[in-house]
Amino acid sequence: MIIATGAAVVITVTTHSPFGEAERATGRWLPLLRFGAVIALTGVAIGLLQLGVTGAGLTGGVMQLARNVIGITGIGLLTSLVTGGLLAWILPLGYLGFAEYALIEAWRNPWTWPARPPTDRGAWICAVLVFAVGLGAFTLRGARTRLADDG
């Protein structure tokens, strides 16, 4: 869970853009660039993590790792809308602590997907739904660029 969260945090921090208004001037391609960047980074992270754990036995397998990266990235993308890209790591790390507690207490709710088995359909639905909502909102709006975000 810690490795998956680390990968998701790196993806969400990359949503920060130092360009601000100049970035918004790129026109209609900007949402597609945001979408493509998040999808590509998420896929690369899952692929590299899969390559990194092939020799060692991963509890839960690669499917659970992929589900955790996808879901926690969605949490980070939603956080970036409120806090900006540089602080988008806060809520995913908080969720990691919550998920560790849920794992210890053996909670069975789908929204505690890191504590669920890799084949749990409800956990997959919840993680993918969080990712889809976060990706959609980030694609259309982008991460917050300043405290008094007017746009």
Image (spheres, rainbow, N blue to C red):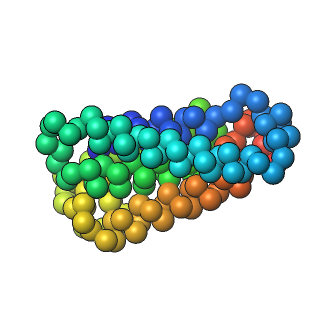
- Horizontally, residue 148 falls left or right of residue 57, namely right
Q: Position of residue 59 (x, y in %)?
A: 17, 48
- Horizontally, residue 127 falls left or right of residue 105, namely right
Q: Residue furthest top?
A: 18
Q: Residue furthest left?
A: 57
Q: Quadrant of residue 8?
A: top left
Can you see residue 97?
no
Can you see residue 123?
yes
Along the viewing direction, whichever of 55 and 111 lies nearer the viewer: 55
Question: What residue is shown at x 52% (from left), y 44% (from top)?
Answer: 40
Q: Quadrant of residue 83?
A: top right
- Horizontally, residue 126 falls left or right of residue 62, namely right
Question: What residue is shown at x 57% (from left), y 51% (from top)?
Answer: 78
Q: Which image quadrant: the N terminus? A: top left
Q: Position of residue 72 (x, y in %)?
A: 43, 49
Q: Position of residue 13 (x, y in %)?
A: 55, 35
Please state the total of marks drawn on the protein image: 0
Question: What residue is shown at x 82% (from left), y 41% (from top)?
Answer: 26
> From what the image shows, is residue 108 above or below residue 42?
below
> From what the image shows, is residue 49 above or below residue 71?
above
Along the viewing direction, whichever of 69 and 39 lies nearer the viewer: 39
Q: Position of residue 62 (x, y in %)?
A: 26, 50
Along the viewing direction, whichever of 11 and 99 lies nearer the viewer: 11
Question: What residue is shown at x 31% (from left), y 71% (from top)?
Answer: 121
- Horizontally, residue 15 falls left or right of residue 124, namely right
